[in-house]
Image (cartoon, rainbow, N blue to C red):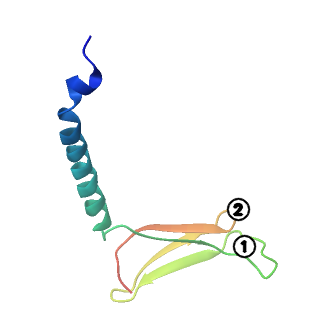
Amino acid sequence: RISMRKKFGKLTPVLVSVCLSVLGSAVVSFAQDLDDVTISGRIVDSNNLPIVGATVTATLVTTNVERTVVTDGDGRYRIVELPPGI
């Protein structure tokens, strides 16, 4: 009977190193993705009740391009895939 440690002992550090390298490069790639900006939030009144159906608009100042969404039943909104900017 061969123990798992003897069978995979030398392979384990190499496998762990490869896995960490792949995971690390995936995190770096994700962190550099500036093409997918998301703005989200919740609109409430002074009593902390949600404002349903409110219009929320994001405007890219340099181009005046606008994206508009409407709040849901809980007052939440989310605008996705915006270019980074002011």
Q: Residues within 10 Å of mark 2 (few under 14, many from 20)?
A: few
User: Toward which corner of the image does residue 64 lie, by quadrant?
Assistant: bottom left
Q: Residues within 10 Å of mark 1 (few under 14, many from 20)?
A: some
Q: Nearer the viewer, residue 64 or 84?
A: 84
Q: Position of residue 60 (x, y in %)?
A: 39, 83
At a point 30% along the width and 59% down the height, the residue shown is 27
Q: Position of residue 32 (x, y in %)?
A: 27, 68
Q: Which amino acid type is marked by label 2?
A: Gly
Instruction: Tell me the distance, in whole angstroms, between the alpha carbons under discs 1 and 2.
Output: 8 Å
At a point 25% along the width and 61% down the height, the residue shown is 29
Q: Is residue 12 above or below residue 78?
A: above
Q: Position of residue 43 (x, y in %)?
A: 67, 75
Q: Is residue 11 above or below residue 40?
A: above
Q: Position of residue 73 (x, y in %)?
A: 70, 62
At a point 21% along the width and 23% down the height, the residue shown is 7
> In the rendered image, which quarter contains the C terminus?
bottom left
Q: Nearer the viewer, residue 40 or 65?
A: 40
Q: Secondary structure at mark 1?
A: loop
* Sequence-first disc among 1 and 2: 1
> Along the horizontal axis of the image, is 75 left or right of 40?
right
Q: Is residue 73 above or below residue 9?
A: below
Q: Disc 2 marks which residue?
A: 73
> Along the horizontal axis of the image, is 44 left or right of 62?
right
Q: Which amino acid type is marked by label 1?
A: Ile
> In the rendered image, which quarter contains the N terminus?
top left
Q: Disc 1 marks which residue?
A: 51
Q: Are marks 1 and 2 in contact (CB under 8 Å)?
A: no
Q: Nearer the viewer, residue 28 or 61?
A: 28
